[in-house]
Amino acid sequence: MSLLVWNCRGLDHPLAVRSLAGLMTFNKPSLAFVIETKLKDKEWDHIKKKINMSNALGVDSRGRKDGLALLWARSMKVEIKSYSTHHIEAVIVKGGEPPWRLIGFYGHHETRNRKHSWNLMRLLHGSSDLSIIFIGDFNEILSDDEYVSQRRLRPQWQMDSFRYVVKDCGMIDIGYSGIAFTWSNNFISPSSTRARLDRCLASKSWRDRFPRAQLQHLSTNTSDYLPILLILGTQSQSIPQQKTRFKFEGGWCLYEESKEIVQAAWEKRDITKVHEVAVAFYKQLFTSQNGGKLANIDRLPTRHLGTNSQAAMENDFTSEEVKKGLFSMTRNKAPGPDGMPALFFQHYWPILEARISVKWCLTF
């Protein structure tokens, strides 16, 4: 079973309809949630046949803005519970299995109205005890590394508001595979603005029920949004399990109990062993026997440091300088091989400071 989600930026053009039909034919999803359709509900009777879906609920667009639709195959039993211009809520029933809730979600595009999106999430989450997922275009990010722009930074308070509602509802971001960003004002240009605005958030009970569920970022050339595909997976399906790289998420800092966890984990960490492995690696790297390629290095022009510069470079670093350098780093940029960005060390510095000596840092 799978679910396709796409902010298509309008199905009022034949090319966009063909793109959606191609996505449906290639991926064969059981359900599809389509955002910014720019269509009325009655127009789906014609389109659902073109994309080989038996059932559809459309939420009317406002003029030629917005518009949502949930489509499902004949084999699916779907009970529509509620809908608005920013969501469609359905209960999914399959065979004799327990039902679960699907919320197709579209966050307010205007920043000033984003609070209404988070209030809607809280309201929907609290209306039932069934396992639940929110999936769609939230028009917001959870951390700095989900946004790249040469124009401006994403305001911290915007991300915090989204993080708080995710925490309040006890939801889990199930992650993804594929391209890192789901929206861009120009995917081709290296100087474009890009963001991960689309995702799937799941309750713990839903995640426990579908532990193999995966979210894939697909591709298209007819929208500035990428489609996403949620593959649920079952015990009978063999979905390759990729070895994922650990990555510290900034939202974890919101949990007060995380400090106790970091304290306990850090005390168990064998710093000496890490040190020994690193030193051994770099000794081997820089004492390689393949030195013939450097034979002419003496012929290269060189520039010499002045006496004052040499003296400054030979001075020992202090703990305060290490701390200053750490706290001057961008919080979520370029995490190390262990997945830990500067934010981790900045936030938990009172716990980690005594364990991270200047000598240890310089040895690495």
Image (spheres, helix red, strand yellow):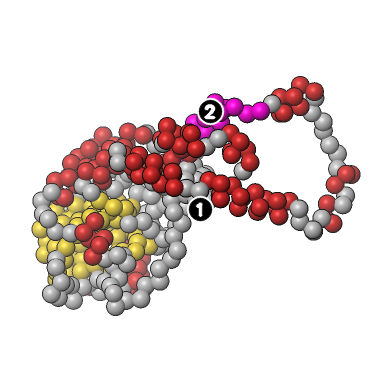
Q: Residue at x 18, y 41 (%)?
A: 119
Which residue is more in the foreground, 160 or 18?
160
**Which residue matches tag 1?**
188
Q: Which mark is residue 308?
A: none
Identify the secondary structure beneath mark 2: helix
CA separation, marks 2 and 1? 37 Å
Residue 160 screen position, x and y as percent = 31, 37
| Residue 186 in sight | no
- Give the residue type at disc 1: Ile
Q: Is residue 113 left or right of residue 27?
A: left
- Give the residue type at disc 2: Lys
| Residue 312 in sight | yes
Tell me if mark 2 has few (under 14), some (14-19) or many (20+) residues whose alpha carbon lies within 10 angstroms of its own.
few
Identify the secondary structure beneath mark 1: loop
Tell me if mark 1 has few (under 14), some (14-19) or many (20+) residues whose alpha carbon lies within 10 angstroms of its own.
few
Which quadrant is home to the C terminus? top right
Q: Residue at x 14, y 68 (%)?
A: 98
Q: How many marks?
A: 2
Residue 174 screen position, x and y as percent = 32, 57
In the orientation shown, which residue stands out farthest toward the bottom?
A: 236
Residue 321 is one of the magenta-drawn residues: yes
Which residue is more in the foreground, 25 or 149?
149
Q: Is residue 269 above or below residue 233?
A: above
Which quadrant is home to the N terminus? bottom left
Which residue is more in the foreground, 172 or 200?
172
Residue 16 is one of the magenta-drawn residues: no
**Which residue matches tag 2?**
324
Magenta highlight range = 316-332
Q: Are marks 2 and 1 in contact (CB under 8 Å)?
A: no
Residue 180 screen position, x and y as percent = 44, 54
Residue 200 screen position, x and y as percent = 29, 56
Q: Residue at x 82, y 31 (%)?
A: 304
